[in-house]
């Protein structure tokens, strides 16, 4: 798979937006041209109030071109060589990747809101996103466990009463938190519910959690 090219030098004025229209929308403070472009489009559409009309027009044009949304996203996602380094495609692709809208898009793809008056939620992309999330977590845990090996291992020849007594549990806990933040967060979530976190004002669960991580890592 090709890696995304840097678009840091791209200018939103190169793609038909130019400067804000006088009296239409405010100057966008962001220095990122991709975010600036999206914000200007959003402000323009909010000003005109016809986003639904424009979206339908785009979909109608896509139908005429025998192109739909899955194929469009597939094509610009480094799958068509002719488009991979095209300046316009690069800009549009990066605008999506860095947009403030992307988290909300993925949230609704994973769990779309129920339609008004209906109790059935669209299936959406829950399985695909869950599978991707699980693969990502597994890969992250593998990397973090590799980072923990020096912290969690003690050569047999170095094993002694003095060595064990010299271990600083606080220092080791800090190393685990630093080198394996995802693993630490998962164990915290599994061992202590949010309600327990609120009730537990005195006890420090870090030691219990560290022992669980230590046992599991072997």
Image (cartoon, helix red, strand yellow):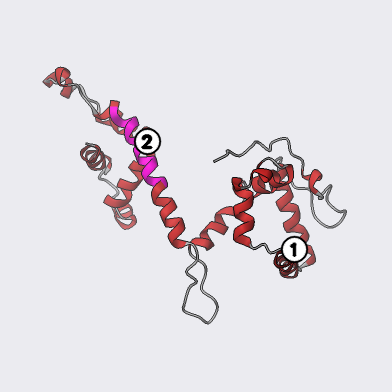
- Residue at image x 46%, y 56%? 129
- Which labelled disc corresponds to residue 67? none
- Using the rendered image of the protein, determine whether residue 189 is visible from the camera's viewpoint: yes
* Residue range of the region highlighted in magenta in the rendering: 136-149
- Which labelled disc corresponds to residue 143? 2
In the image: residue 90, left or right of residue 141: right
Could you say where residue 197 lies in the image, as x and y percent from the top left? 32, 52
Nearer-the-camera pick, 88 or 201: 88
- Quadrant containing the C terminus in the rendered view: top left
In the image: residue 9, left or right of residue 183: right
The quadrant where residue 194 appears: bottom left
Could you say where residue 69 lies in the image, as x and y percent from the top left? 63, 61
Q: Which residue is mark 1?
A: 46
The quadrant where residue 5 appears: top right
- Using the rendered image of the protein, determine whether residue 175 is visible from the camera's viewpoint: no
Above or below, 117 against 60 in this view is below
**Label 1 crowding class (10 Å Cα cut-off): few <14, some 14-19, many 20+?**
few
Could you say where residue 142 lies in the image, as x and y percent from the top left? 34, 38
The quadrant where residue 203 appears: top left
Q: Is residue 6 magenta?
A: no
What element does badge 2 sit on? helix
Could you say where residue 29 lies in the image, as x and y percent from the top left? 73, 44
Mark count: 2
Work out whether mark 2 precedes mark 1 in sequence or the reverse, and give the earlier one: 1
Foreground disc of the pair 2, 1: 2
Work out which residue is located at the far bottom of the displayed protein and give it: 117
């Amino acid at each position: 798979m090709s890696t995304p090219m840097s678009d840091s030098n791209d200018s939103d004025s190169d793609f038909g937006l130019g400067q804000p229209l006088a009296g239409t929308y405010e100057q966008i403070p962001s220095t990122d041209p991709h975010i600036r472009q999206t914000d200007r489009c959003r402000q323009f559409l909010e000003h005109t109030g016809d986003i639904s009309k424009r979206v339908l027009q785009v979909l109608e044009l896509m139908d005429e071109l025998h192109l739909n949304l899955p194929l469009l996203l597939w094509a610009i996602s480094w799958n068509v060589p002719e488009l991979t380094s095209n300046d316009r495609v690069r800009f549009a692709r990066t605008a999506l990747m860095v947009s403030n809208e992307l988290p909300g898009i993925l949230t609704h793809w994973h769990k779309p809101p129920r339609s008004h008056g209906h109790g059935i939620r669209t299936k959406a992309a829950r399985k695909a996103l869950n599978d991707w999330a699980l693969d990502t977590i597994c890969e992250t845990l593998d990397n973090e466990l590799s980072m923990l090996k020096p912290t969690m291992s003690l050569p047999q020849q170095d094993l002694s009463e003095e060595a064990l007594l010299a271990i600083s549990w606080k220092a080791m806990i800090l190393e685990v938190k630093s080198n394996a933040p995802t693993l630490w967060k998962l164990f915290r979530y599994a061992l202590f519910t949010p309600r327990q976190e609120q009730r537990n004002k005195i006890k420090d669960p870090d030691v219990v959690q560290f022992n669980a991580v230590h046992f599991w890592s072997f």
